[in-house]
Amino acid sequence: RVVQISVWTNDPKLRDIISAGIDVALAQTRFLELPDGFGARIIYKNSMVIDALQKSNLYRRDLNYLIEYATTTTEQVAAVIAPQINQNSQLFTL
């Protein structure tokens, strides 16, 4: 999956400072812990600067990261609660 983090500010220098801080923090993070206890690998993909709204004093940068994680499924199965062994016509309960 691709995760996008968008930074909007009213100043292009502030946008760049905030974006750099986020990028440095995530660059130091190789794996994220997910709620199910498994990990997800985070990989920098790209960044886009969007100044189309500068007349409105809005400056944006999108940081895109690839997040790789395993898809897990769970299912309920019957549990053995009273195992028995049949040996030489004799029944043993464990």
Image (spheres, rainbow, N blue to C red):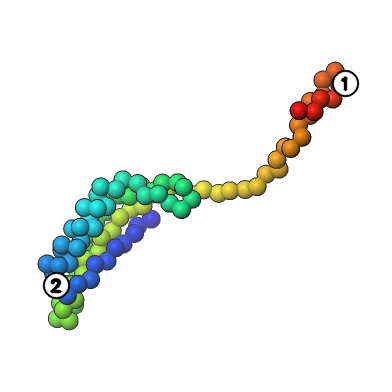
Which residue corresponds to the image point at 28% horizontal and 58% vertical from the top-left? Answer: 64
Indicate the position of residue 75 as horizontal and vertical percent values: 62, 48
Q: Nearer the viewer, residue 50 or 9?
A: 9
Indicate the position of residue 32 as horizontal and vertical percent values: 37, 49
Left or right: 4 in relation to 19: right
Of the 4 image quadrants, the one containing the C terminus is top right
Q: Can residue 13 be seen in this view?
A: yes
Which residue corresponds to the image point at 70% horizontal and 40% vertical from the top-left? Answer: 79
Earlier along the polypeptide chain: callout 1 or callout 2? 2
Q: Can residue 52 be seen in this view?
A: no
Q: Which of 75 and 37 is in front in this view?
A: 37
Indicate the position of residue 72 as horizontal and vertical percent values: 51, 48
Residue type at mark 1? Answer: Ser
Of the 4 image quadrants, the one containing the N terminus is bottom left
- The numbered dot on residue 89 is 1
Left or right: 38 in relation to 74: left
Residue type at mark 2? Answer: Asp
Indicate the position of residue 58 as horizontal and vertical percent values: 19, 76
- The numbered dot on residue 5 is none
Q: Mark 2 points at which residue?
A: 11
Circle 2 residues within 10 Å: few <14, some 14–19, many ≥20? few
In this view, the residue farthest toward the bottom is 56
